[in-house]
Image (cartoon, helix red, strand yellow):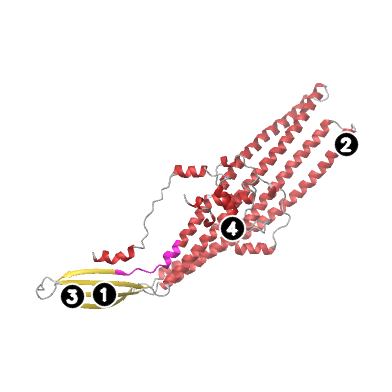
Amino acid sequence: MALSLMALPGLGGCVHYQPKPLSAPATLASIEARTLDAADLARFLQANHQATSWPPSAWDLRSLTLVAFYYHPDLDQARAAWSTARAGAVTAGERPNPNVNVAPGYNSTTPASEMTPWILTLDLNFTLETAGKREHRLAQARQLSEAARLNIATTAWQVRSRVRQALLDLHAATATSALLERQLQIQTANLALLARQLAAGAISPFERTQARLVLDTIRLTVHDAARQQAEARVHLAAALGVTVQALDGVTFSFDVFARAPAELPTADARRQALVSRPDILGALAQYEARQAALQLEIARQYPDVHLGPGYQMDQAANKWTLGLSGLLPVFNRNRGPIAEAELRREETAAVFAGVQSRAIEEIDRGLAGYRAALAKIATADTIQADLRKQGQSAQVQLGAGEISKLDLGSIQLELATAELARLDAIVKAHQALGALEDALQSPVDSADWLLTAPPREARPPERVRR
């Protein structure tokens, strides 16, 4: 009873359990209800300086990236991990609560007429931490929290990268489909001309059969392009964190893929990425956390001091005591945990070096790949320009009666094939550019836009409350 009464003052600040049920059908319904014209999404885009009419006439890479920042669960997980790490800092800073011990007693040999036979003993025990243990715990928790915060930026870049790749795939499939439809029209017209020539006995059936096989191949390729276009929409929806039905009726802007920037990152930009990429800084924060953990284990060599004031009412006599106690480091001085902490620090240092080494490789490989892709575009441009000149010349020759419509059709088909090759070169260049940006974790052609992961607080209340 006495213990309960003594604990009452602390109960006012207790946290009470609040149930928060999680239901698979409810979560599924929430995901399926996500759309790109939601009012809360509009407020989120406006809060993050996406100035545009609502809803946008065409969704570009930047606006779609913000949609993914709003909806994608990976960022929710990263933010939740950061919140957990920050809570760990609160735990690390808490001081030990004192212990209380109440031990009532009764002296059965004491006559009740002389004095009370009851003996009441009350002992307190306060732990006084030594050697800065609390500060080392706090330092470790703060570094782990910083690593979790930096992981949000890393996750945000990964989300943006997936959105960019999915949008590029959709652009490639859409543009390829349009060029294949053009090829189909040209080859259909060519086959009709060959059919008339076959009827006139000007060509053999073999030549017409070859042309028909080419037409059939183009038709099958058109179906492949349609399949790739449908799959790209699914991948884009997944990258945004919505269902593919949410993209129905949505128009996309592929202007970001209209050209491949020729300027490559400078040596300063490369070095800046190698010392400031979020994953590199996160690995460095993990190392600092290991440093603090080692300091904590070293501090644990020194025992904490336990201060134990006590009071005893011994049959009406008041008695006071003051005790000091502590762990006696006789059999060990915490050498084992210290050695483990030192080795974990070395392990984390090796991990950090590995992260930075991989970053160097990724950046250098990205630069080499992008340079080669730009050279391929230049070659494709030259081939296409030559074929266009041939096409213009063929139009003049056709008007003069020097060539037939079939000859012109063959040149036009060759030009359409060259356009497909050039599209493939551009897509490959943007894939290489994406790999380079992933290595730098920064847009190459958008230096004015620093990619950050918007904090949860920037979300509208309707999105935060579930």
The one nearer the camera, 193 or 175, is 175
Task: Determine which residue is flagged by label 4.
Answer: 452
Q: Earlier in the sequence, mark 2 or mark 1?
A: 1
- Which disc number belongs to residue 310? 1
Q: Which portion, as a residue range, is magenta?
A: 87-99
**Label 3 – label 1 distance at C-alpha:** 13 Å
Rendered residue at 67%/43% (across/down):
172
Amino acid found under the numbered disc labelled 1: Gly
Task: Determine which residue is flagged by label 3.
Answer: 314
Amino acid found under the numbered disc labelled 3: Asp
Task: Determine which residue is flagged by label 2.
Answer: 396
Rendered residue at 80%/47% (across/down):
382
Nearest to the eye among marks 2 and 3: give it. 3
**Label 4 – label 3 distance at C-alpha:** 68 Å
**Label 2 – label 1 distance at C-alpha:** 112 Å
Magenta stretch holds residue 163: no
Vertical side of 231 occupied by 366: above or below? below
In percent of width and height, residue 452 lies at 59, 58
Q: Earlier in the sequence, mark 4 or mark 3?
A: 3
